[in-house]
Amino acid sequence: MHDRLTIVKVGGKVVEEPDALSSFIKDFASIAGQKILVHGGGRSATAIANQLGIETKMVEGRRITDKSMLDVVVMVYGGLVNKNVVAQLQALNKQAVGLTGADLDLVRAVKRPVKDIDYGYAGDVTAVNTEHIEELIANGVVPVVAPLTHNGQGQLLNTNADTMAAELAKAFAKIYRVQLVYCFEKKGVLEDPSNDNSVITHLSYRLFDEYKQSGVINEGMIPKLDNGFSAIKHGVSEVFITNIDGLKTGFSTGTQLSFNE
Amino acid sequence: MHDRLTIVKVGGKVVEEPDALSSFIKDFASIAGQKILVHGGGRSATAIANQLGIETKMVEGRRITDKSMLDVVVMVYGGLVNKNVVAQLQALNKQAVGLTGADLDLVRAVKRPVKDIDYGYAGDVTAVNTEHIEELIANGVVPVVAPLTHNGQGQLLNTNADTMAAELAKAFAKIYRVQLVYCFEKKGVLEDPSNDNSVITHLSYRLFDEYKQSGVINEGMIPKLDNGFSAIKHGVSEVFITNIDGLKTGFSTGTQLSFNE
């Protein structure tokens, strides 16, 4: 039986509000056993970009990353957010290390090919290298991963944090029994977006397909769920979508995905 | 006999000009054996701060780090400079990991006490923890260290890169035969600042003291040399001050410090 590894992706408002983030970090730190944290930081990058006079362009929830926007996300995700999270984990006596996909050659990607839209320096993941990070995890270190990758030729790339978490989960599923947890501001996947208590406790792939077609599950959630189901398909044991409270209850208040009924 | 570890601190114009930095990284990568890179990035932080409308204040060559300037240096040193250097090392097939003092609890500091001047979030180093980094180095990984520290209570601090390199060198001198190399745009310590070829090949502590009093060695060089001599005093085997060309020649074109005559 493999050891358990919990990979938590935190994003949305939880990352943007300092108090919510500190509170999240405490709950994350108290999850038993080996773990990895993947963070986003979307709107903080937008705010800094604004201050620098750089316009933010989004298409279908994905950021168009030109050269100056790439510098901003490297500064904000790889620097500001990542290092503050690490310092806060250290304050809780959790040994942690902040990484991007370039560090330890952790996640390689290729610049997304231009079809209808030129996403600029957006990276589609091609490989995850667990070699050195495995040893760190085994020694009790918590990797804190920013959603940045590299192409192996010196170019950093911007990669969606949900995708980053799913790709790490798939790679570590060869070594660990992986739990992948998407933590954001909602309790879970909602049957009625206007009712925070309408959490879908178990979401099968068939139901997801139905909800997608009927429009119950909206655009913003679809990439996250695609990532989650892809993780299950590739050997990840459990995938949850939940909020901070869910971390305290073993994720039981959120949505659990299952590939079969 | 301990293994050799070469710690190179790169700063000044070498870090600010992309071509000079790429060229430096190639030469650094070709240094044989185990190594650590410590980088500055001073004027790039000043440029970004300007764009963000944050005023840069320096006293005796040291940056006054208020809350918004701290965010800038965390973004620029910990994110932009650090991650681009790591990506470039990966492109040369050098396994590398970018770190601040918060990562792996590498360097702790205290906020500098306010005497005549309030330096803000400036960190004076109190402890270096080599525990996890030793294993990475032994496995062929090159740590790339940004000049940021933490206080163990969740607060990041801004620490001078020359000091950071010297403190790392002292701590690793207990485990390795450490060479500490300060690499900047000048050939070495100059007897005549207006003559680039007036390199002082060997600088003893007595000579340094004389030069300081006579004003031959100017203000900008004194903290660097104080750090260098402090490193030798605390067990570091060799300290060199040189430029990129010096890296190619085993540092023989630069200045070597020695505590005795």
Image: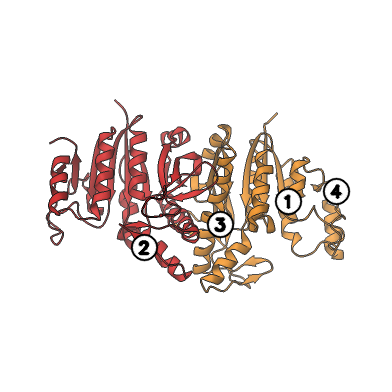
Chain colours: A red, B orange
Tell me where residue B35 appears, x and y as whole percent.
64, 39
Q: Are marks 2 and 4 in contact (CB under 8 Å)?
A: no
Q: Which chain contains the residue that carries disc 1?
A: B
Both labels 3 and 4 in a single chain: yes
CA separation in Å, label 1 and label 3: 22 Å
Could you tell me which residue is drawn at 30 percent across and 61 percent down?
A: A13
Q: Nearer the viewer, mark 1 or mark 3?
A: 3
Q: Which chain contains the residue that carries disc 3?
A: B
Residue for badge 3:
B77
Q: Nearer the viewer, mark 2 or mark 4?
A: 2
Q: Quadrant of the N terminus of chain B?
A: top right
CA separation in Å, label 4 and label 1: 15 Å
Residue for badge 1:
B228
Q: Quadrant of residue B160?
A: bottom right
Q: Secondary structure at mark 4?
A: loop
CA separation in Å, label 3 and label 4: 32 Å
The mark nearer the N terminus, 4 or 1, is 4
